[in-house]
Amino acid sequence: MNVFDTLMERGFIEQTTHEKEIRDLLDKEKVTFYIGFDPTADSLHVGHFVTVMAMSHMQKAGHKPIALFGGGTGMVGDPTGKSDMRQMLTVEMIDHNVECFKKQMSRFISFENDEAIMVNNADWLRHLNYIDFLREVGVHFSVNRMLTFECFKQRLEKGLSFLEFNYMLMQSYDFLELYRRYNCKLQLGGNDQWSNILGGVELVRKLHGDQSFGMTFSLLTNSEGKKMGKTEKGAIWLDPDKTSPYEFYQYWRNVADADVKRCLSLLTYVPMEEVNALTAVEGSEMNKAKERLAFEVTQIVHGEEEAQKAQVAAKSLFGGAASGGSIPTTTLEASEFEGGMDIITLLQKTNLVPSRSEARRLIQQNGIKLDGTPITDIDYLIKADVDFKENTLMIQKGKKIFHRVTLN
């Protein structure tokens, strides 16, 4: 099967610049393509993971990925989808984040034997001569047309800085550079990158008279159109130190029934025949599909061993046991419980609540249990010799969130 058909069947493709030409190109030759990742944090998150999976499908079909890290564009910041200007990062922070991205990307894409390339656009963007850049690139961009793009329109009311206005030119220049250096003919990205991708396709055509192509993918949204990958604690990261494998597993285990098929299609390699069979059920039978989803995604991101540990931990908790080495754990000093620690303070120390008011609300609504016993008193004091069994206490928040506290 042509990889274009694979991506279409699995629900990746949203928009293409030239659908027939792209399909034919992918059918007839080994295509060098690129996806860009701006290093706004020190880890990729699940929003990036859709494009990483698309990149992997493309590589498995024999095409050559370029993972472009935005050491240059990251110094400006993409205004797309943002109501305010992004936080400005220092050069040191950006370079650190790029190195973190490189390590993570190597887990999903093979860079051996020239099967793929890692590139940092800092190599050409940080040392540009601005006047030369304006004369070569800026002359081809119409300000009037740029202001019609959604990425700029939604910012005009609150204010769009000239710094950010340059971003589209810089991303377009990336495509031009990769075309010149590696004969890269195809840029892929999230659907929110459509206008930036069009800019690059047009720039290659105007400066070289050659045809290049663009294709965008679905953003990771649920059945209600809201972005997935967020929890009360924030983003779901691919770095195990920022989101533990157990929390990562649990996130996918708990997605809504309506979102299971989409997630299995986009985020795993499970064949579509199997995806369709797994999700052609209703009610409690959907739990099998959710467990498969959680295991498969966790296995890809964190490895089979961590996926198995997370699965065992989840099943032991739902079975009423307090075992499983993958459960999030906080270790506190026994001395902190001399005289008792109030339940609200403990919930804050374990990062189970963002505020004391949220803790009070949860307790009053029977949303907190200690070792299976509901706690309804917001002033309840936890004591080491009363509440801990073998120096361990299990906190349950709602139906599905568990956290172990151990004493040192």
Image (cartoon, rainbow, N blue to C red):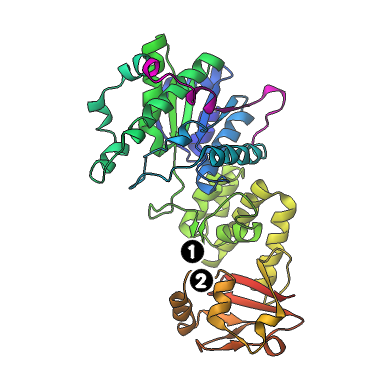
* Horizontal and vertical percent position of residue 3: 55, 29
Please tell me whether residue 24 belongs to the stretch shown in magenta.
no
Q: Compare marks 2 and 1 and give the one earlier in the sequence.
A: 1
Q: Circle 1 is placed at which residue position?
A: 232
Report if the CB atoms under discs 2 and 1 are less than 8 Å apart: yes
Quadrant in the rendering for residue 192: top left
Q: Which kind of residue does numbered mark 1 sit on? A: Glu
352 or 275: nearer the eye?
Answer: 352
Q: Which residues are magenta?
A: 109-133
Q: Which kind of residue does numbered mark 2 sit on? A: Val
Question: Looking at the figure, which quarter contains the N terminus?
Answer: top right
Q: Residue at x 65, y 46 (%)?
A: 300
Question: Looking at the figure, which quarter contains the C terminus?
Answer: bottom right
Q: Circle 2 is placed at which residue position?
A: 353
Instruction: State how far apart marks 2 and 1 are (Cα).
Output: 8 Å
* Horizontal and vertical percent position of residue 349: 58, 72
